[in-house]
Image (cartoon, grey):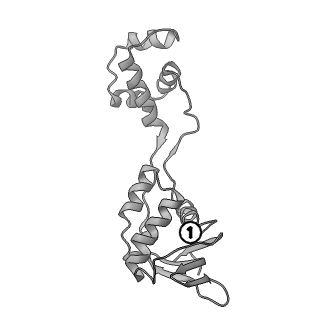
Amino acid sequence: MAGPTGRGRSLGAALNDLLRSQVTPRHRLSSYHAQHWHAQLSQLTGTRCGYQALEDAGLGVTAQTLFNWLSDPEYSARRSYRDIIHTAYENIAIVPADPIPDHITDGQYEISGVVKTGDDVRTRGTRDAAPLRIDGSRGNWDAIKERWMAGELTDDEFEDHFIDDVIVEDIGEGTDGWEFTGASYSVEVR
């Protein structure tokens, strides 16, 4: 039975495609795009969680001050208050990533595409060659998880860490390291 599959123009892109099909990455809510402190404050005070974000960020003003700020867009709030409003806005506008699930970190990977180690270059996952099989449970996923949760897991970083922290941990360095120089990859996890 086939498991979740990711596809991409690089190994890192295929890995990211696979991961994003399983869990939600860190992202910005599309409805939170205001730049000016007054517009941000207006949006925050429209919901209970917005008020909570303001409180959590340390905004300690009276209801009358809030009313004055909201009723006059030209009102001049102190820079420290504007910074607190901006912090609250950013905190509520960013949705944290879902953690990487165990079936991804403990899965058995089948990688199809051009795989190179030393002078050995093969297109894996064809009728003539089996996919490269990797046991993800032997890998060290800490750096990948950290970058994923921070919203900083680029395709290139995912590929680099997957090679160094998962492939090498499972089957070793290869002849002269591992390279994925092809233009199309498929990664399936079981």
Q: What's the amino acid at mark 1?
A: Leu
Residue 28's spot in the image, x, y percent? 52, 41
Residue drawn where x is 51% and y is 54% of the image: 24
Q: In this orientation, which residue lies closer to the viewer: 149 or 54?
A: 149
x%, y% of residue 95? 47, 44
Q: Is residue 51 above or below residue 73?
A: below
Decide which of 154, 30 is in the foreground and name it: 154
Image location of residue 31, percent across then percent down: 58, 34
Q: Secondary structure at mark 1?
A: helix
Q: In the figure, residue 7 lies in which quadrant?
A: bottom right
Residue neighbourhood size for the residue with mark 1, other residues' Cα within 10 Å, grouped as few (<14), some (14–19), many (≥20):
many
Q: Nearer the viewer, residue 49 or 34?
A: 34
Q: Which residue is mark 1?
A: 11
| Residue 21 sits above or below residue 119 on the image | above
Q: Is residue 62 left or right of residue 184?
A: left
Residue 13 visible, this orientation: yes
At x 65%, y 69%, the residue is: 183
Q: Residue furthest right?
A: 127
Image vertical order of residue 19 relative to residue 173, above or below? above
